[in-house]
Image (spheres, rainbow, N blue to C red):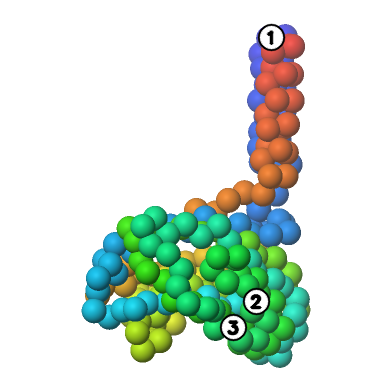
């Protein structure tokens, strides 16, 4: 009986982990990311003053307005936001208040000046609606120099961070800038509901194991 109980417990735990938890990138209503950018090489750099540039563009190019993006919680760690934001399309807000985008136009962009410190951190939240037959919607983040040109990076379109919303969910990628050197670290954050399901499933699994031991 002991071996049967142990097998049943393992089956419950396996089902909880593998069968009951959907992949957040596919089934979650939103994709959440914490972003940390090493901006120390920009301090006092002659290519400045610099601006932070965010775009959230409709893949279909028609402005179908089926997705939104929010960028919030900016922490400059020795730097600060400067000036006023320049907004186009479905972009609203500022670095201080947070930025919000809808893909109501083919191009939706916000950029604003900043004085760099050692690091820059912020949070990104994207909805994951897919328009059938359309190209993926695309979120991107980059840094602009004094001429409002993107710092050259290894990322798509000279971006430091991109998220593509396709049929399989959200896919993110990062790039780096070599001169000046800017690197970015991105962490995908599971939705609270996903963690709650995981915790509950584990408790159920271990509860069965303890009761039958």
Tags 3 and 2 touching, CB below 8 Å? yes
Please provide percent x and percent y for residue 170. 61, 65
- Which of disc 1 and disc 2 is earlier in sequence? 2
Confirm whether residue 159 shows in the render. no
Q: Which residue is mark 3?
A: 87
- In front of the other: 131 or 210: 131
> Badges 2 and 1: C-beta atoms under 8 Å apart?
no
Secondary structure beneath label 1: loop
Q: Is residue 103 above or below residue 198?
A: below
CA–CA distance between discs 2 and 1? 58 Å
Q: Quadrant of residue 145?
A: bottom left
Q: CA distance from mark 3 to mark 2?
A: 7 Å
Q: Tell me the distance, in whole angstroms, between the alpha carbons under discs 3 and 1.
A: 62 Å
User: Mark 2 = which residue?
Assistant: 92
Residue 155 occupies quadrant: bottom left
- Viewer-proximal residue among 65 and 90: 90
Q: Residues within 10 Å of mark 2 (few under 14, many from 20)?
A: some
- Seen in the image, is 82 located left or right of residue 95? left
Tally the numbered discs. 3
- Asked if residue 114 lies left or right of residue 30, the reply is left
Which of the two residues, 112 or 84, is positioned nearer the viewer here? Answer: 84
- Point out the frontmost of discs 2 and 1: 2
Which quadrant of the figure contains the N terminus? top right
Q: Which mark is residue 213?
A: 1
Report the residue that reaches farthest toward the front: 83
Which element is circle 2 on?
A: strand
Can you tell which of label 3 and label 1 is closer to the viewer? Answer: 3
Q: Are marks 3 and 1 in contact (CB under 8 Å)?
A: no
Measuring 71% from the left and 38% from the top, which residue is drawn there? 196
């Amino acid at each position: 009986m002991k071996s049967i109980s142990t097998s049943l417990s393992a089956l419950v735990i396996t089902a909880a982990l593998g069968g009951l938890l959907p992949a957040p990138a596919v089934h979650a209503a939103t994709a959440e990311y914490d972003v940390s950018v090493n901006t120390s090489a920009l301090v006092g750099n002659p290519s400045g003053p610099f601006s932070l540039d965010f775009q959230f563009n409709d893949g279909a190019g028609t402005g179908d307005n089926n997705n939104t993006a929010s960028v919030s919680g900016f922490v400059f760690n020795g730097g600060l936001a400067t000036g006023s934001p320049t907004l186009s399309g479905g972009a609203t807000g500022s670095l201080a208040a947070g930025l919000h985008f809808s893909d109501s136009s083919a191009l939706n962009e916000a950029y604003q000046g900043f004085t760099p410190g050692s690091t820059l951190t912020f949070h990104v939240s994207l909805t994951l609606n897919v328009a059938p037959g359309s190209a993926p919607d695309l979120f991107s983040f980059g840094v602009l120099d004094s001429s409002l040109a993107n710092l050259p990076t290894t990322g798509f379109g000279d971006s430091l961070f991109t998220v593509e919303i396709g049929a399989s969910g959200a896919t993110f990628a990062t790039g780096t800038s070599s001169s000046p050197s800017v690197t970015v670290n991105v962490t995908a954050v599971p939705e609270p509901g996903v963690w709650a399901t995981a915790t509950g499933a584990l408790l159920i699994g271990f509860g069965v194991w303890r009761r039958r031991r």
